[in-house]
Image: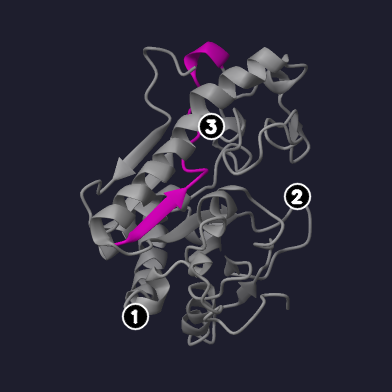
Amino acid sequence: MPGADDPPPFEVLNPDAQRPVLLICDHAGHRLPQALGTLGLDNADLHRHIAWDIGAAAVTRHLARRLDVCAVLATYSRLVIDLNRVPGAADSIPAVSDNTPVPGNQNLTEAEEEARITGLFHPYHAEITRRLHHLWRATGQAPVLFSIHSFTPTMTCGGPPRPWHIGVLWDSDGRLALPLMEGLAHDPDLIVGDNEPYSGWVVGYTVAAHAGSAGLARAAIEIRQDLIATEAGAADWAGRLASILEGILADPGLYVHLSDGGPDPSGSDGLE
């Protein structure tokens, strides 16, 4: 898994880009390996937010082009295995997602789970490692990791609305997140979440595993899905982000890994 007739578990954009920045999109696709059929779901469910981060792939594509940077996008649905969760966790291969049972994920054997880990999880994360290593080696600078996600306008069907247009997720390293939030705050019509609707301290695996452990500058964003569900909306948000990030990425302080022993340039422990 995936089989011989299935596409690979990730797509790489701008593979020859030499800027020391890597974009990633863990939940870019909603494809299923042929061997798993539909996981017992109908076509509508496989295009809902439970299957992928709606609009996130389009934003990533536009942003990679605008910034001229490399990007790695996952091609299979998070319902097969969530690449942003630790394998073995309850939400790694969800039996139920947002109150929707996933029949093909129930009562799996350890061997069946391992097949998904081996076929999808490991190749995607190995490619991120490979791309970061290449950029670090080619440029002589510690690369920046920027992760792109989207979130639903309500947490559950019929739940209260989420007011944020975009959330910036970060942990102890604010080198990227703090100036990004500052740039976004220049638009008075935007509601920007500081570790909302999720916290960079407690949610997710990928950024912490690849950048947090290496002391790389890092951040993740969550954009509300109704704002980027169309190609025009995704392009607009990518343009908005690119205009802010261009200035931020000019800071040489981003391209130093903090495990060198230097102080946190943000001046904050991120616990706010």
Q: Residue at x 44, y 50 (%)?
A: 24
Could you tell which of marks 1 and 2 lies nearer the N-terminus?
A: 2
Query: For the view shown, which residue lies furthest in the front direction?
Result: 261
User: Is residue 22 located in the magenta-colored stretch of the structure?
Assistant: yes
Q: In the drawing, what numbered circle is on residue 247?
A: 1
Q: Nearer the viewer, residue 16 or 213?
A: 213
Please state which of the two labelled residues, at mark 3 or mark 2, is closer to the viewer.
3
Marked residue nearer the N-terminal end (3 or 2): 3
* Front residue of 18 and 81: 18
Q: x%, y% of residue 189?
A: 54, 82
**253 left or right of 166 in image:** left
Q: Are marks 3 and 1 in contact (CB under 8 Å)?
A: no
> What residue sits right under mark 2 in the picture?
156
Determine contact: label 1, label 2, CB under 8 Å: no
- Residue type (three-letter) at the residue carrying disc 1: Gly
Query: Between tags 1 and 2, which lies in front?
Result: 1
Q: Give the residue at x 53% y 72%.
A: 261
- Given residues 233 and 18, the one toward you in this image is 18
Element type at mark 1? helix
- Helix, strand or loop status at disc 3: helix
* Numbered range of the magenta stretch: 20-37
State yes or no: discs 3 and 2 in contact (Cβ < 8 Å). no
Look at the picture and state if 114 lies above or below 164: above
Q: Label 3 sits on what residue type?
A: Phe
Estimate how packed mark 2 is, as few (under 14), some (14 to 19) or many (20 or more) residues with alpha carbons within 10 Å. Answer: few
Number of callouts in the render? Answer: 3
Mark 3 → mark 1, Cα distance in angstroms: 34 Å
Number of the label disc, if any, that sits on residue 74: none
Please identify the quarter of the rendering in which residue 65 is found: bottom left
Q: Is residue 246 above or below residue 75?
A: below
User: What whole-number distance in Å separates the C-alpha atoms at marks 3 and 2?
Assistant: 27 Å
Q: Which numbered disc covers residue 121?
A: 3
